[in-house]
Image (cartoon, rainbow, N blue to C red):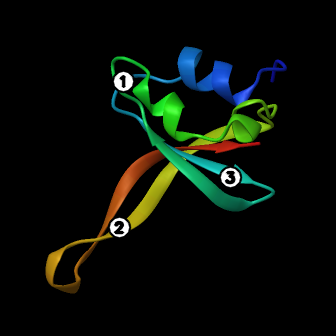
Amino acid sequence: MELITLSQFLRDKTGVCELCIIREDGWITAAAWIDNEDLFIGNLSSRLLEKPVKGDAWGTLTIAGCKGSHHEIPCHYIDV
């Protein structure tokens, strides 16, 4: 993978409406829903945004629904 920062990756390598889960050393440290105007960038720490991306993969994330139900939703995992 080319050397690219998380900020560049989120802006250039993702699409609108993607749910991105950012993992640092294997731990989920942030999440971003990619919007049309890149407003998500303002909610992520500058320290995290400057880290190089080590890899990425598509997977699922379990979320809780109403009345105790659980659902698997697609997400884009990004490792920094």
The answer to whether mark 3 and mark 1 are in CB contact below 8 A is no
Mark 3 crowd level (few <14, some 14–19, many ≥20, 10 Å Cα): some
Q: Element under label 1?
A: loop
Tell me the tag on residue 16: 1
Q: Is residue 77 above or below residue 63?
A: above
- Residue at (22%, 72%) from the top-left corner? 65
Q: Is residue 6 above or below residue 60?
A: above
**25 to 62, vertically: above or below:** above
Quadrant in which residue 79 is drawn: top right
Residue under label 2, please give it: 63
x then y, percent, for residue 2: 82, 18
Alpha carbon of mark 2 to alpha carbon of mark 1: how far?
A: 20 Å
Residue type of the residue flagged with mark 3:
Arg
Give how far across and how far down residue 76 sits, in percent: 52, 41
Of helix, strand and loop, which one carries label 2? strand
Crowd rating for badge 1 (residues with CA inside 10 Å; few <14, some 14–19, many 20+): few
Name the disc covering residue 23, or none: 3
Q: Measure how far apart labels 3 and 2 are at the Cα level.
A: 17 Å
Q: Is residue 38 left or right of residue 80?
A: left
> Mark 3 or 2 closer to N-term?
3
Give the quadrant of residue 19: top left
Identify the element where label 3 is drawn.
strand
Locate residue 32, reporting x and y percent.
47, 41
- Which of the pair 36/57 is nearer the observer? 36
